[in-house]
Every structure is written in C-alpha cells, then in structure tokens.
Amino acid sequence: MMNQLEDIASQLLQQQDLVLVGHAIPDGDCIGSMLGLACALRALGKRVEMMLENPVPVIYHYLPSWKDIKAPQKVERGGFAAVWLDCSDQCRVDQVVREALAGAQLVINIDHHPGNSLFGDYNFVDTQAAACAEIIYRLLNIMAVPITADIANCLYAGLIMDTGRFLNSNTTSLTMQIGAELLKSGASVELARNNLFESKPLKEVVLLKYALQHLGLSEDGKVAWMCLSLDEAVQADARDYHPEGIINYTRMISGVEVGLLFREVAPGQVKVGFRSRGRVDVASLAREFGGGGHRLAAGASLKGSLEEAAARILARVKDVC
C-alpha cells in the first residue's frame, strides 16, 4: 500500500530506535539521503544506525558522519524500525543485510524508482522526484526539522549526483527550487565541486585507462560499451572500488543511444551499468536481467564470464536500439 509522506513523517517522529539502509554499490543519492536523514533524526534525540554492504566511496568522505555508516551486522535488539532508502525492492541489498534487519518491528520504504515493490509496512514512492534526497528534504519540512548546513550538504550531494549536476531530464523546477533552498541553508557548491568532480582518486583514472582499451561500438553506432576485468581492477588496486563516472564516457560518443560498462567483480560475477541518452528505457532492460534503476541509468548483476555477460546484454540492447 502506498502512503502519504505525512504518514512517513508521523512514523519517524514516533520511533526512537532506527536503522537506515541503502542499496548495494551506493551512489551519491543513496549516501546523501541516508546521511541527511540520520543527521535530522539524531537532532531529534533518536538513536540512529546506518548500514551499507559496500564501503562509502572516497568522494563522499567530505560529508558529515560518513564514518558512522557500518557494514551489515545483525541487530540483536528488538523494537527498532528499519528505514530503506533509494531501494526499489529488498533484492537491492545482499542477503546478509536482510538477515541483519530481520528483527525490525517496522519497515519504512522511501524511494523514487519506478516499479518499487512496496515492500514496507509504510511506503512512499514518488517516481517524479529526481532523487531520493528530494523526498527527504520534503519529509524533513513536514517533520519541522531545521535544515542545518550538514543536512543541506548531504542532500545537495544526492541531488546533484542523481541529476547529473542538474542536467539530466529528471531535473524539474521543484528540484531546482530545493537545490536553491539547500544552498540558502548552507550547502557548499565549492565543497561539492571539489570533492565530487575534481578530486578523482588515481585508481579511478587508471581504471578509465583500462576501460578505454576495451571500448566497443556497434555497427550502427547506437551502442557503446567498455569492459573491466577483475585482473585489471587488481592491477589498479581497485578491486573494491566502484567508480560512478567511467560509464558516462560511453554515452558521450556522438550518435550513441545506450552506453554500457561490464565490470568483473569476482570470478564468474559481472556487474553491468546501463546509461541511456533518452530514447531507450534502460531500467526496463536491466529488470530483464534481475536489476533495476532509472529510465536513463540502471544496473544489473550477472553470473558467468565477462565475455558471456557482455554477449548476452549486447544482443538484447541491440534489439531495442
């Protein structure tokens, strides 16, 4: 059942013990939404924990309280509420996370992805919102929580990463208004620019070098892809590093409708990123392979070799381009 945002606000105000969780391979919206909400709830005197199965990427280490985000550990106490952020379903996290939260007395689901399975006891999903951070901003206003500079920086990071610096088609007038309000509340454009876009770790640049060596283009020029093997990630000292920006180089090529990045993360396991210029709904494609995401940006995980995964995905993508 879908609830109103006021219902979510009421439940959060009633709960005293909360665990916030986001999806695997967290992006800026997932992390920013989690940290912003945690800052607000802690300001209300609530006990708040944060849980992610993957490490917080270095570019987000400028955000307050990022060190408080922990790896999944079973929550032994009862009586806590689990708040899922930016997750279209519970399969966006590993089984270890689901087991850690098994004792939750209440599940709250806040998201903006189409096709959300409404798995919570309370669900608010706004597919028109450009980012989950946009929803959190509106939620905090309903809860009458003052937006501090710390909260503003967190939510601003979520907004600019999920909108591609306010350039993607999901950006609305409301998104821009919220961005302006966050700046008024103390969000720093300079901090965001320096950390998110102008401070790339060397390992990401090395990964880009390897990925460009495996750049492919379909005969009609509508599909571009890059591949990264596990060996190359190890050579770059980046086996556990999840770069957000490399895939965008495929979509930058003139004439390309869909860009892809195939990344071998373990023997027999491949992560696939999808990016669309606009005509193709890559979230729909990703769902065919057990993944999900947005119309213009999505992901999936496949079993098999890098070559097998690429062949399967490319055959399907070429069908729709």
Image (spheres, rainbow, N blue to C red):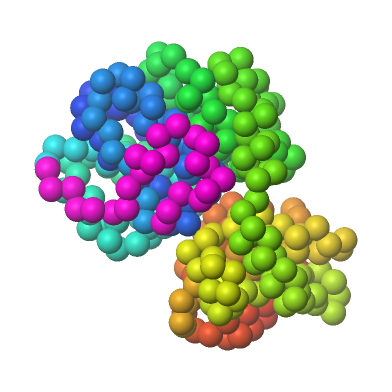
Quadrant the N terminus occupies: top left
Q: Nearer the viewer, residue 238 or 180?
A: 238
Residue 188 position within the rendered picture, expressed as x and y whole percent measured from the top left: 62, 25
Q: State the residue at coordinates (59%, 58%).
A: 243
Q: Is residue 56 magenta?
A: yes
Q: Residue 122: tell me if it is visible.
A: yes
Residue 261, by quadrant, is: bottom right
Q: Is residue 145 magenta?
A: no
Quadrant the C terminus occupies: bottom right
Residue 180 position within the rendered picture, expressed as x and y whole percent measured from the top left: 65, 20
User: In the rendered image of this protein, does residue 224 appear above or below residue 202?
Assistant: below
User: In the rendered image of this protein, does residue 214 appear above or below residue 139?
Assistant: below
User: Which stretch did the figure color magenta?
Assistant: 54-77
Residue 12 position within the rendered picture, expressed as x and y whole percent measured from the top left: 30, 27
Q: State the residue at coordinates (26%, 20%).
A: 45
Q: State the residue at coordinates (67%, 66%).
A: 206
Q: Residue 114: tell me if it is visible.
A: no
Q: State the residue at coordinates (21%, 27%).
A: 16
Residue 156, by quadrant, is: top right
* Horizontal arrangement in the rendering, residue 187 relative to residue 266 (left or right): right
Residue 83 position within the rendered picture, expressed as x and y whole percent measured from the top left: 32, 40
Q: How many marks?
A: 0
> What is the magenta segment's predominant secondary structure?
loop
* Horizontal arrangement in the rendering, residue 320 relative to residue 288 (left or right): right
User: In the rendered image of this protein, does residue 33 appear above or below residue 22?
Assistant: above
* Horizontal arrangement in the rendering, residue 219 relative to residue 30 (left or right): right
